[in-house]
Image: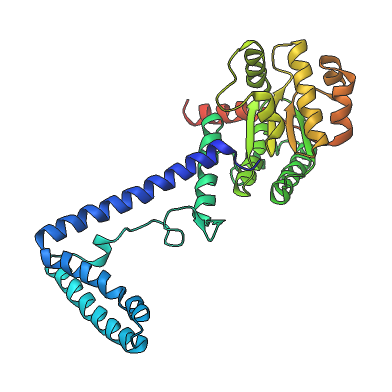
Amino acid sequence: MGYGVKIYQAACKELEGRRRRAEEKAAACRERFFEDCPRAAQIREEMARNASGAARAVLSGGDVRQELTRMKERGMALREEYNGLLAQNGLSQEDVTPQYQCSNCRDSGFVDGRMCQCLKSLQRRMAYERLSMDAPLESCTFESFSLEYYQEDERVYRQMEKVFRACQSYGEKLRPDSPSMLFRGGTGLGKTHLSLAIAGKAIEKGMGVIYGSAQSFAVALEKERFDREPPEEGDTNTQLTECDLLILDDLGTEFPSAYVNAALYNIINSRMLAERPTIISTNLTLKELESRYSERFASRIAGYYGKLEFLGNDVRVQKRLQKSRKHP
């Protein structure tokens, strides 16, 4: 799936705009230059005629080598005169030729039929920005995750250090066929933070990521169930099934519904069969997941997901207490 069609189209549109603006700016400057200096326009025409001299020589049976030498000398003289007129008008070649942001592809996005690095980078940036609209991606990185909030209990600290290292390794080694993960633990223990840190690594690798809470997905699934018109960006079920990495946050907090439960099972099962990684975070135990959803739902997670247990006290509460002590 990669970044998805919408992001690809948006990136291509952005490059098209860059290319058009560069060419329009150069054309406008060139037009003003020719108005102020008619001789420069004449030189351009002479340069074009001069360039066709070799072809004429071949067609007429003339001395091609002699014609090429003459054409080269004439071209150099015309170029020198043209550059001199530019300088007299306070201009340079850069002012009258398009200045593309990417010199490799000239802002087309492709070089010899292969996607240019600039288009790849632009898609990555757009994917990052899009996900950041739904989640605090910039503030949830591995670098910003602190183990200091787990230091009061040595057992908790060792476990959370293990969790952190495991998430780091998972993010670094992440592939489209990586195993799925279950993050289980109480509220405010860093499950969302580390999920989004992994999402950032996935985007860097060019993977298409969908992040959301179980509640937000449930609302979308229920809404589309009764909608007559399909969503512009594709139905939620298809997007959640086919994205490269799905992050399902706070599973178990959504409003209970037989339809949503069945839809979530189908999504998780389809992704498992397609070997697409999913990260699920929840406060529920496997026994509670079985009771809330179904035995087969819980068995899929128990049998096919790597599990990380988050321990400690709510970090958000600790941060608020620290802040209140500093600013009573």
Q: Relative to 248, is 129 above or below? A: below
Query: Residue 138 appears at what percent x and percent y?
Result: 53, 40
Write the residue at 80% across / 23% down.
265
Query: Residue 167 appears at what percent x and percent y?
Result: 72, 43
Query: Residue 91 appears at what percent x and percent y?
Result: 18, 64
Q: Tell me if 37 is positioned left or right of 221 in this view.
A: left
Q: Quadrant of residue 242?
A: top right
Residue 189 seen from this side: no
Q: Quadrant of residue 153?
A: top right
Residue 210 seen from this side: yes
Write the residue at 11% across / 63% down.
38
Write the residue at 56% across / 35% down.
131
Q: Relative to 263, is 5 above or below? A: below
Query: Residue 187 appears at what percent x and percent y?
Result: 69, 25
Q: Quadrant of residue 296?
A: top right
Looking at this view, is 114 or 262 the one in front?
114
Looking at this view, is 162 or 91 the one in front?
91
Q: Relative to 225, is 158 above or below? A: below
Looking at this view, is 46 or 108 the one in front?
46
Residue farthest to the front?
60
Looking at this view, is 47 or 249 the one in front?
47
